[in-house]
């Protein structure tokens, strides 16, 4: 069996795209998502850090500083993997910030801002906050609501108690106001705090009106960016906000947005527990975005996932790739933030790998989450390898190889006992469902201090649409039945996705609405299973090596069920057949050596 395990493992890991149902080769050109750009840019930055190059923004009397070379190479890496100039600038600025860059320095000459430096390096045109799109949340909106409400408040005289038309000539726009009491203690501080709060609140309302859950993080950042587009972004704030010349406009704007959206006062980095003041973070990100070009939806999704590296991500509304649920493969980017910041702090790839590995333990399905990250990191190594992707590979390779070996053993023993390939795949799927049920139940029980048991009794396609696509690609039209027991009280939720959810939402059924956040994570975890095809390609390859059929016939048998193992995605049968052919070739070579 050792020879079969070695052959199938080598075949499965021969190319990154063979272990996933997603089109990750297309992603390298920017088609779909930009997390490959995020990884490659982070590798550039980490290389620079380990070589001792500085990331600090300084107001020096020279055209370029050390950070310019980091930015230039980071932007090039992002653009080489499909990012347009504005997206490349946004990704580079976000990652430089997480790695330790400050976002602004200098007043007035020699003034530098991180977002503007990245935009200039990428050759992107400035588009203004008005044109910023939110990450997609089913629908998507722009920052227009924030800008609209801020300008309405401005014209109504609600941003500051100072009416500019009443101030005598020769004061406004000069040092008499710009860096003195009237400007800093009244106009700039009031506009920053009030405008950011108004803009952030408007974004929250707009989210809800577009049928999306209001996103506190994006709303706060957009409100802050819109405020900083108006007020002096480099003004020192009055001492009620903190020590003299330690607190500037971005913090005050972030402070206003944080209060308006209900964000927690502090955030905590996953695993390390490093604390971030939320107002500082939101203010800094607002400065970056107000100077940005015109990022696209996938650029903002990359931004959103980079900042999923906080423990509070589910509360604040950053991406999902930090856990506990496994994100679609194109979203995986939180690992980048975790690894990059750890490398910046410790100078150690091994320490970064430890952080990644520990974080995966908190996922609903730690094994598949690790394998997904391993696939992405191996693809990145083909494009622009470096410390970040190697840290992820180091953290996830043992889990990946162990998972493959276990499936080989299960398939070998099952076939030896007379089971069919289909029966073996079904047993692997059932094991995966049980694992997700148990882990989600345990996490929900701990979070809610209740005894929660979730059971998924049906998961298939063809819930409400007609035709082959609906039945074949189950994630596109899921037909799911769920049972949930809370402190002994059982509720049966038949037709969960296509009947229970819309009925509860549209008819405001509070008893069911309270259950949805408890049950949905388990269902959602299983609907993105196509990111890792280990339960398909490994059994098929093992069966082919054992002479149970041809790669073409056995892969067709496996995918004809349209099962969870296939991920419900086109082309997976071809990948299973290719892995099987490779496994046969490797097995012949391994057998010769034995």
Image (cartoon, helix red, strand yellow):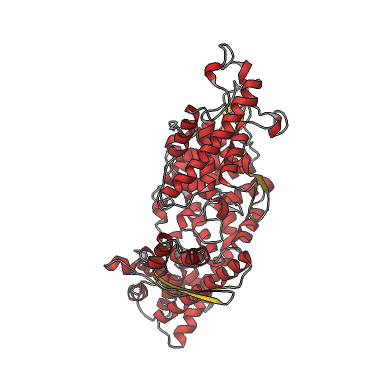
- Work out whether residue 590 or residue 526 is closer to the camera in this orientation and state it: 526
Most extreme residue toward the bottom, as rendered?
417
Position of residue 363 measured from the top left corner of the image (x, y, whole percent):
57, 63
Q: How many marks?
A: 0
- Work out whether residue 572 or residue 97 is closer to the camera in this orientation and state it: 97
Residue 449, quarter of picture: bottom right
Residue, x 62% and y 60% (percent of image)? 357
Q: Is residue 2 visible?
A: yes
Position of residue 52 measured from the top left corner of the image (x, y, whole percent):
66, 39
In the image, 459: left or right of 332?
Answer: left
In the image, 378: left or right of 569?
Answer: right
Q: Is 586 situated above or below 33? A: below
- Work out whether residue 143 or residue 62 is closer to the camera in this orientation and state it: 143
Q: Is 117 situated above or below 141? A: above
Position of residue 323 measured from the top left corner of the image (x, y, whole percent):
56, 59
Position of residue 469 measured from the top left corner of the image (x, y, whole percent):
30, 65
Q: Is residue 73 visible?
A: no
Most extreme residue toward the left, as rendered?
467
Residue, x 49% and y 56% (percent of image)? 376
- Work out whether residue 168 or residue 36 is closer to the camera in this orientation and state it: 168
Q: Is 518 situated above or below 247? A: below
């Amino acid at each position: 069996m050792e020879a079969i395990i070695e052959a199938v493992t080598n075949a499965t890991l021969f190319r990154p795209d063979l272990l996933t149902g997603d089109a990750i080769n297309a992603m390298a050109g920017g088609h779909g998502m930009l997390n490959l750009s995020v990884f490659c840019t982070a590798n550039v930055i980490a290389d620079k850090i380990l070589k001792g190059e500085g990331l600090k923004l300084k107001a020096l009397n020279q055209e370029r500083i050390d950070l310019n070379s980091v930015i230039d190479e980071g932007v090039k890496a992002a653009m080489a993997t499909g990012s347009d100039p504005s997206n490349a600038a946004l990704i580079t600025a976000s990652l430089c910030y997480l790695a330790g860059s400050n976002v602004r320095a200098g007043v007035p000459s020699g003034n530098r801002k991180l977002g503007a430096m990245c935009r200039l390096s990428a050759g992107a045109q400035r588009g203004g906050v008005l044109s910023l799109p939110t990450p997609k949340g089913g629908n998507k909106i722009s920052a227009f609501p924030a800008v609209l409400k801020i300008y309405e408040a401005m014209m109504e005289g609600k941003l500051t108690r100072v009416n500019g038309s009443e101030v005598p000539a020769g004061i406004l726009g000069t040092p008499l106001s710009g860096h003195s009491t009237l400007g800093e203690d009244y106009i700039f501080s009031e506009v920053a705090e009030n405008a950011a709060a108004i803009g952030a609140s408007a974004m929250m309302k707009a989210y809800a009106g577009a049928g999306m859950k209001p996103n506190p993080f994006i709303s706060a950042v957009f409100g802050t960016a819109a405020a900083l587009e108006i007020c002096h972004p480099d003004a020192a704030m009055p001492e009620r906000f903190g020590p003299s010349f330690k607190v500037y406009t971005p913090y005050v704007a972030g402070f206003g947005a944080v209060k308006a959206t209900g964000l927690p006062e502090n955030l905590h980095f996953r695993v390390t527990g490093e604390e971030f003041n939320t107002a500082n973070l939101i203010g800094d990100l607002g400065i970056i975005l107000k100077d940005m070009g015109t990022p696209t939806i996938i650029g903002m999704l990359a931004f959103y996932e980079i900042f999923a590296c906080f423990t509070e991500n589910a509360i604040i509304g950053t991406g999902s790739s930090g856990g506990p649920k496994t994100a679609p493969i194109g979203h995986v980017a939180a690992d980048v933030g975790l690894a990059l910041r750890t490398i910046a702090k410790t100078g150690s790839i091994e320490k970064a790998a430890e952080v990644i590995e520990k974080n995966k333990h908190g996922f609903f399905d730690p094994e598949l989450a690790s394998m997904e990250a391993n696939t992405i990191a191996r693809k990145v190594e083909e494009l622009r390898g470096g410390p970040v992707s190697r840290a992820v590979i180091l953290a996830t390779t043992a889990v990946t190889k162990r998972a493959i070996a276990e499936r080989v053993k299960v398939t070998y023993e099952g076939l030896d006992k007379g089971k069919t390939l289909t029966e073996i795949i079904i047993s692997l799927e059932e094991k995966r469902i049980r694992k997700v049920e148990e882990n989600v139940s345990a996490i929900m029980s701990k979070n809610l201090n209740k005894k929660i048991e979730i059971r998924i009794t049906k998961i298939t396609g063809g819930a409400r649409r007609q035709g082959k696509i609906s039945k074949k690609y189950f994630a596109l039209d899921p037909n799911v039945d769920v049972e949930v027991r809370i402190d002994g009280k059982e509720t049966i939720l038949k037709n969960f996705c296509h009947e229970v959810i819309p009925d509860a939402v549209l008819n405001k059924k509070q008893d069911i609405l309270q259950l949805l956040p408890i049950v949905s994570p388990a269902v959602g975890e299983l609907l993105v299973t196509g990111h890792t095809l280990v339960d398909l390609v490994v059994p098929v390859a093992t069966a082919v090596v054992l002479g149970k059929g041809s790669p073409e016939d056995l892969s067709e048998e496996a995918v004809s069920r349209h099962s969870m193992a296939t991920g419900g995605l086109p082309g997976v049968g071809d990948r299973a057949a290719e892995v099987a052919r490779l496994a046969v070739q490797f097995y012949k070579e391994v057998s010769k050596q034995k």
